[in-house]
Image (tube, helix red, strand yellow):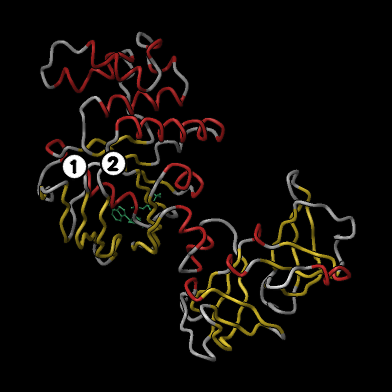
Amino acid sequence: MTNDTSGDVRLSGITKTYGSFTAVHPLDLTVPQGSFFALLGASGCGKTTTLRMIAGLEEPTGGTVHLGDQDVTALPPYKRPVNTVFQSYALFPHLDIFENVAFGLRRRGIKSVKKQVEEMLDLVQLGEQARKKPHQLSGGQQQRVAVARALINHPKVLLLDEPLGALDLKLRRQMQLELKRIQTEVGITFIHVTHDQEEAMTMADTVAVMNAGRVEQLGSPTDLYENPRTTFVANFLGTSNFIEAEVDARSGDDIVLKAGGGKLVLPGARCGAPTSTGGKVLVGVRPEKISLTHADEAGEIPEGRNRITGKIADSSFIGVSTQYVVDSPVCPDFEVYAQNIDRDPRLVPGADVVLHWNPAHTFGLDAAQD
Ligand code: ATP
């Protein structure tokens, strides 16, 4: 770790309104130097507006933007130590790749650019393509030129606005890893805007999930996935099951809940709901954490697992595992999704089953939140 804080980005009460519409509600956010940070959210949630306020392309209605110790709120974009890579790449079509990358240096009057441009082209693995024109490169290669062109100015912070949005799925996956490698190599702060949860989780060390102009939750990809604090976050980052339950008692660090006729155990530390007796909790558990056992074999399920009964409504074999949709009297309002690696030929639609999982994989949300 470094003590360098020049690439810290600090937003304090930053807000943006358009007439009576608030695109970004007062937002406090610190992105530490050297992190790969993602602003993740659905279209219209305010992530691009937030990015543009950091870049200086959008004037905040209130609040401040600091880069390192410097208050840059009133600085125009070109005076901020920040560069932006857009989805459209915005390469100059008439210039070759070398000149596209050299552009920022030449504009600053720097004459000997060869070494720096070559280093940048090597960084993005395009050393061989220097004399081609942008249209002779693939989408992924053009994207890397855009990254090299931005990085050659040695920004403290690189902003990426849906940079992979125009690429097909396979190329997008390659570029995700590629961007992550480049970020690790240059070590500066990357702030990435995307609506694609997989992309954010693959690349970023910290993700801010935005919803309707607010950061709903901030954390590492694993933390957000395993400990979502709202149903929005739980559903945005994959699929989640929800079971309505009621607090019955405490047992050491655990909370014992009543659900249907049975009981479920939830680690207290993973409960974001009031835990007084009678409190309503929405119990969440990811499908891949739930196993299915035919009701006839229920006696073989190890002690200590949460369990609910159900009947298979549908199943689909997806290669590595089989996914099941189960109707359970314990949660009449929701279907339950589960996943088994082992295939049991008796687990077909109509079969009575027991769904069971390790209580450690359970999270609890406030049932009154929405
Ligand atoms: P997308 O992924 O579609 O770009 P986003 O999350 O980046 O979405 P923003 O572009 O930040 O969303 O926009 C947030 C909200 O602000 C949207 O409802 C948008 O319609 C609104 N908005 C953005 N720019 C303006 C503008 N210049 N005037 C009025 N409303 C605007």
On the image, which quarter does residue 104 sit in? top left
Q: Indicate the amino acid at tag 1.
A: Asp
Q: Residue 160 at x, y = what percent?
A: 34, 39
Q: Are marks 2 and 1 in contact (CB under 8 Å)?
A: yes
Q: Nearer the viewer, residue 270 or 90?
A: 270
- Determine whether, in the image, residue 28 is placed left or right of residue 257: left
Determine the CA span between mark 2 and mark 1: 9 Å
Most foreground residue, 53 or 209: 209
Is residue 87 found left or right of 298 in the rendered image?
Answer: left
Residue positioned 42% across, 54% down in the render:
41
Between marks 2 and 1 in the image, the one whose residue lies nearer the viewer: 1
Disc 1 secondary structure class: loop
The residue at label 2 has a CB less than 8 Å from ligand 1: no
First along the sequence among labels 2 and 1: 1
Q: Position of residue 319 (x, y in %)?
A: 75, 43
In the depicted structure, whether residue 196 falls above or below residue 339: above
The N terminus is located in which quarter?
top left
Check disc 1: other Cα within 10 Å, few if <14, some if 14-19, many if 20+. few
Residue sitting nearer the eye, 99 or 368: 368
Q: Amino acid at mark 2?
A: Gly
Residue 129, x across and y down, in percent: 40, 12
Which residue, given by chain and number where applicable, does mark 2 sit on?
34
State the SS at label 2.
loop
Q: Position of residue 102 (x, y in %)?
A: 23, 17
Task: Please give the name of the residue rendered at 58% of the width and 89% of the height, measured from the top-left corner.
Answer: 248
- Res. 4 mark: 1
Q: Is residue 311 above or below residue 46?
A: below
Check the image and report above or below for 280 versus 328: below
Callout 2 environment at 10 Å: few (<14), some (14 to 19), or many (20+)?
Answer: many
